Each structure stands twice: as C-alpha cells, then as structure tokens.
Image: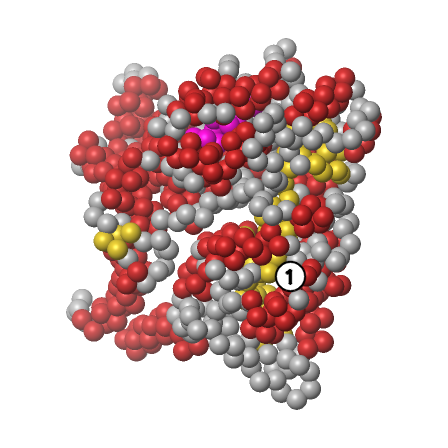
Amino acid sequence: MKKNRTMILAFILPTVFCLLFMYVYPVVRTVIMSFFQVESLTSDTSAWTFNGLANYAKIMGSSGFQLAMKNMMLIWLVGGLITLALSMLMAVILTSGIRGSKFFKAAIYMPNIVSAVALATMWVQYIFNYDYGLLNEIVQLFGGEKVKWLGLDLKFWAMLAAFIFGSVGYYMLIYISGIEGIPRDLYEAATLDGASKVSQFSKITMPLMKGIIKTSITFWSINATTFFLWTKMFSPVNTEGSTIVPVVYLYDIVFGGKGIIERDAGAGAAVGVVLTLIIIAVYAIMNLTLKDSDLEY
Amino acid sequence: MKKILAMLLAVVMVFGLAACGGDTAEETTPATTGQAQTATEPAEGKKYEGVELTMWSMWGSGEPQALVIEEAAAAFEAETGAKVNIEWKGRDINTLLSAALESGEKFDIFEDDYQRIATTYVDYTYDLTAMAEAAGYADYSYACFNDQVVEWAGFLNSIVEQPQIGGVFYDKAAFETAGIASVPTTWAEFLDACAKLKEAGIAPLALDGAYAYFTFYHHLVRYMGEDALQEVAMNGGWSDSAAVTAAQEIIDFVNAGYLVEGAPDEYPASQNKVGLGQAAMVVCANYVTTEVDNAVGAIDWGFFNYPEVEGCVDSSAYAGANSLAITSYTENAQAAFDFIQYMTTGTYGQKLVDNCGQIPADARLTESVLVGSVETLKNSTAPMSWCGATNANSDLAQSFKDAFNGLYAGKYESGEAFCAALDALY
C-alpha cells in the first residue's frame, strides 16, 4: 500500500497536539512546579520561587504524608492480594462450566455499574452502621456484641473491605476474558493425562495468563495510588488519619480544608511526582519479574 | 474519492478540536490594585437595565438556599433590570475559585468561607468599604466578622450571607424531662446536667467522630486559650500543659457513661440521635440543627456556649460565616453589591432564615431557630476559630484528629497517656 505522508500527518497531528497540550504540558509543568515554592496551583510562573528539593524534603518529613503512604501501601498490598486472588478464583470457577455462570458474572460485576458514591454510602450508612447495620445484626444474631466497624481501629479495614467488594468484579472480567482465550483442548488433553484441576490451573492457566496478571497488577497499582473517593466518603467532614491516602493529602495541601487556609501547590506537585514514580517503578518491576512468554492468551 | 473523504474527516477533526477551545477574547485581566468602579451605564428605564451579573454559588441547585437565591435573582431583575446568572458550583467551590480568579474568569459575585475570602482570594476581591458605609452595613451586621475580615484582608471584602455559631445544641424537651431548669455555664454544672439526663434515661451527649476534633478543641481552648494551644501544637510540650487536665476530664466524662451508645459514631449517625430523642446534646455549629431536622424530623432546639472550666482562660464561642464577595475586576460592582444586599437582607434575607433554618445575616431580621444567637453574635468580639490553633500544624493535624477521636473512644487511660502520645508525634 502506497504511503501518503500528508494523509498520515493530517490524521496524526490533532492527536499529537492533544497529547502535547493536554498531557505532556501539565506533566512537565507539575514536575517543574515540584521544585518551586508555589502557593496557588494556577499562579503565574513569575510568582514561583525556586525551592530545590525542599518540597520533597517537606513531604517526606511530614507525618501526614507518611501515614498516607502507609495506608496506600496497605491498600496496594493487602487489598491487591485479596482482590486479585478473589477475582482469579471467581474467574476460574465461572469459566469451569458451572450452572448459572452468566448470572454470577453479572451479579459480581454489578458493583462496577453502581456509582462509587452510592456504593460507599451503602457501606457506611447501612452495612457498617453501629445501631442497625447489617453486620451488627448478623453479629447479634449469633449472640455477639455490636462492633464499631467504623471506630478508629477498624475504619481503615472497613473501607478497604468495601473497596475490595467494588473491585473484584472488574478484575474477574479481565481474568475471565484471559481464561476464555486459552484453547479448551489444552485442558482436555491435560484431563486425559490425569492432571487435577489444581495442576491444570497452576501448569496451564497461570503461565498462559502471565501477561494479563501483569496488566491487572499495573491497573491495581494505579487504582491504589489514585485512591481518593472512598477516603472522602469514609471521612466526610474532615480528612482523618485512619483513612488518609496520598491523593487526599495532596488535595488538602493544594486546596486547603475545613479550617485550613494554608496552601502549598509546590509540595502537592511533589506528591504527584512521587506517586507517578511509584507507578513507573511498579510497572518496571513487573516487566523485570514477569517476563512476557512466547505463548500467552 | 476515499482520499477526499479522508481529508474532509481530518479537517472536521481539526475544527472539532478547535471548537473545544474557549474564546479567550472576552477574558479579563484581574486588577489587584487601584480598583475603580466602572459600573455599566444604565440604559433608560430601570436602574440596572442591560446589566448582567454572574454569580458562582457554593450551593447545589435545588437546595433550600439555592431556591431562595433564585427567587431573589428573579425579583432583583424585575425591580432593577439587572439579569443575574447563577452557576451552582457546590461545596467544593474552593477548588475552582483560585484558578478562576487568577485567570480573570468572567463572574462578578462568589460565595465561600469568609476566612478564605479574606486570605486566599484577597487579591482578587473588591474593596467593599465605601459601598458598605453608604449602605450603613455596620449598623445591621456583626462586628466580629467585619473586624476579623479587615484584620485578615486589610479591608472589608465580603458580606456575610450565612453566619454560623458553635457550641452545645440541645433538645429542650430532653432538658425539661430531666428537670434541668437552666443551661449549664460551667463544667461542673454541665456534669450535673449530664447526671440528671442519664438518670432520666436520656444519653447526655451525641458525638460523631467527624466532630470529636472540634469538641475537644473547645475544652483545650477553655484551659489554654488559642495562642498557647497553637504554641504547643506547633512545638510539642503537651505533657507540660493544661491539656493533661483537659484530657483527663474528658476521660472521666466518657467513663461516667455520658456519651450516647456507639459514640464516637460515623457522621451523621450520632447527631441524628438527638432528633430521635436518644441523646440530649451535641457539640457542633448551628447547621447541625437543620441537618438533624431534615434527617429525622424537627425538634425544639436550644443552644448554649461550651461551658467554662475551672480557671478558664478563654470562653469564646466559635463563630464563622459563608460570605459573598465581588471580584476585583467586575464591571458592575455597585449592581453586584446591591444584589448581595437584596439577597441577604429584607424579604429574601428573611426567607433564607425561615426556609433554610439559618441565623439572620441581617441582625434586624427575625430569628426562626436558635433564638438568641443574633444577640450572642452581636456581643461577640473575638470568636474562637474552627480548630485554627491545632490546624496551624498542618503536618500533624490528621494525627491530632485521630488522637482527639481516640480520647472519646476510650483509647487512653489517663490525661498523661494522651498527652504523652501527642508528644511522641514530634
């Protein structure tokens, strides 16, 4: 096919311009801003004062940021392990030919089509409620004492449980699409050779899903680092230490909060850069540890 | 043919993208100094015929306040000819305002917290001093807010729309049932009232975790004052301060069983218990009364200042406000000011009071709830901030919130243990 450079340029230019102005420019501006003392996010560059690495030193030394990072790591690690393991389990079960799999797929995916605000409200006001919440009703049914699910010690875990509930369906669908792409005759041959379901899973499914697992871990890492709405829903009036995450910390220092007028967009930009580096690091580690196979689905 | 079609599609895409961009020809440059009033010359007929005002509101469309403001805008247009366009930006308006003001976005009036208007946006706000003087604003507004604004901003740059007052809000019926004849003014009287309420089968205090920070802040301010508290919050030394006694009193209060079951609970579960008759009091700002009334039904609310402690250093009550400001680069400052006055005083000011359960912004209006709050505000000279002393340490503010919450959750055995935990944060 004859290549027409003008045509190629005509089609590519709008996208390139979009990318440059809507993505590259803000990213570059944010990185530069992170080295300056800037009060307002949109202030003119003439109002910026060079600050070296002081913004990074400030956030690294901030107990609020450290707390936020700790919470984020817990969401990433504990939440990631549970969500991805549960999603894989559901995907394997629902692709094994059980009856009613379509119903279960729809039911498990359902939380993803409900607004996250509505979902979080349901968990906070109806499931975790101390007086009439579903969980405490169940606890009392078995003769137990009511639990403060949203008390200081359990609030983070309650929030994480609710987030996992809303996330499993999404990753399950990704895994289902991967598993369904694996030729069935591989499983049939393995069954004829006497391989158990567990062996089939570990020797066929997992190796051939390496690429998809890598993608899902990257997606989860992005979800964990950009975690925001659930914290806002679980701490509706003030940001609380038990639920704070880096993006909420960033939001508070850039825009201020209830009774807080101090703003520091430079430090906020530094938080943004740190989060981006974390995602890049996770992606790089994934590429190094989970090498792409010659054969995968 | 295919080539022509492809070229056409590319052109359409380019035009489509170009259309996404705004017309910057109308952008105005913010004038931060030398504000000169350049009101549009009225055409013949009504006073502001041909004038168009744009207001950015912190309310959401359909909220009681929004309905009154819409009504006021329509009446103002009919009376003066000025058309008022209102954009409902919601509670997160503060995330939009800085960028909009810095870029000189075309709007005339905006609403936000009065402290933020006087500090964060001050360079982009109109000096209202002359217009306020001409309108006699000082005669019917609250000096505590005006003085504070002038102290922060250097000039009057906002008009109060929704004054707020903080302290203890209580169900009058519960007090009557418990035989409490007068509201407590000291901590000892407060404990006595709590004992009577508990005896009458009503939990004395409702507390949501979200407001534990604000509640204990009162107690600390009573013992230390905001300046000393800020000093400790910034540099540590809680264990050597009166915070030990303050914390111990709260621990004793909790151990006496004076918190409603489940407290500190998840907002708004606990505060709603006052409306449900399960608890008698809640420490918050006055909007708690509207929130509870809307959630579980109206009750007869009373209000008193957070009680004084022994050797009380500072007995001031919290006072704050959502206010209205005019952009420094507006072309219709007088019309904007007149609309603000039209909305916050007279018929529509009264409607804001009656329909939204708020304290009158105009002290001449009739209170519909919390009778006496106007008098309290008028007499207030140096109101307490919303946790300003502890928020001053933005690095540790989250940890303070958790620690204060933990105090009411029974996490600490003694005032010393609580203060040692706070000192360990430094």
* A38 sits to left or right of B79: left
Looking at the picture, which amino acid does disc 1 mark? Ala
Residue range (magenta): B398-408
Which of the image's four quarters has the C terminus of chain B? top left
Give the letter of the chain under mark 1: B
Foreground residue among B392 and B97:
B392
Give x and y (percent) for residue A184.
33, 31
Residue at the spot of label 1: B138
* B50 sits to left or right of A86: right
* Residue farthest bottom in this picture: B44
Residue B375 within the magenta-colored segment of the rendering = no
Foreground residue among B230 and A155:
B230
* B299 sits to left or right of B28: right
Which of the image's four quarters has the N terminus of chain B? bottom left
Tell me which residue sits at (53%, 21%) in the image.
Answer: B245
- Residue B94, placed above or below residue B391: below
- Residue A296, placed above or below residue B145: above
Give x and y (percent) for residue A36.
26, 52
Tell me which residue sits at (48%, 58%) in the image.
Answer: B153
- Residue B331, placed above or below residue B299: below
- Say which element carries label 1: helix
Give x and y (percent) for residue B18.
37, 72
* B1 sits to left or right of B178: left
| Coloration of the structure image | secondary structure
Foreground residue among A118 and B142:
B142
Q: Quadrant of residue B274?
A: top right
